[in-house]
Amino acid sequence: MIDVKKITGIGGYEEKEWKDGDEVDRIYVTEENEKAFLVVRPKTIEVRCEKNLGRKLREEYESVMESRYFGRGGIELVMCGQMEDAEIEDLVRLSYNLTLAEQQ
């Protein structure tokens, strides 16, 4: 899966667990405004992204869909190897920065 600690450009965050039935989700929130920027499930991750980028990624990859957690302001990505790790890390970094920008 994804290791947030290894992604450069991400500052302070906190990892929380949320149980949804039998499934345990890990939700990552910024320390500064305590808003979620990443949701990690056993087979998927969800990140915030700009609407145009989300639409482009959904058109380009079968494994990308609209986010359940963030709605139209994000994407959910099935971790199936269709997207490279570096691209996923970029999306997590973007999500973190977009979440920080919301407080300003």
Image: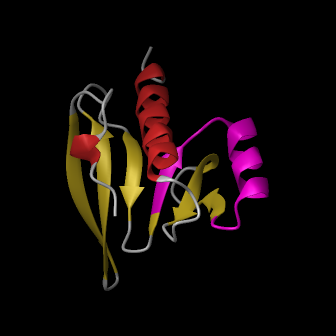
Q: Give the position of the N terminus as an image quadrant.
A: bottom left
Which residue lies at the image location 70% right of the left edge and 50% below the top edge?
A: 57
Which residue lies at the image location 54% right of the left edge and 50% below the top edge?
A: 70
Q: How is the image coloured?
A: secondary structure
Q: Give the position of the C terminus as an image quadrant.
A: top left
Left or right of 49: which side holds 56? right
The x, y position of residue 79, in whole percent, is 48, 67
Q: Residue at the bottom extreme?
A: 22
The x, y position of residue 47, in whole percent, is 49, 48
Residue placed most toward the observer, 34 or 77: 77
Which residue lies at the image location 48% right of the left edge and 38% below the top edge?
A: 90
The quarter holding residue 53 reads: top right
The x, y position of residue 103, in whole percent, is 42, 20
Which residue lies at the image location 76% right of the left edge and 46% below the top edge?
A: 56
Q: Is residue 41 above or below residue 21?
A: above
For the image, the number of numbered tags is: 0
The quarter holding residue 93 reads: top left
The x, y position of residue 45, in whole percent, is 45, 60
Q: Residue at the top extreme?
A: 104
The quarter holding residue 66 reads: bottom right
Is 54 inside the magenta-drawn segment?
A: yes
Q: Is residue 23 above or below residue 73?
A: below
Is 89 inside the magenta-drawn segment?
A: no
Highlighted range, magenta = 45-63
Residue placed most toward the observer, 53 or 103: 53
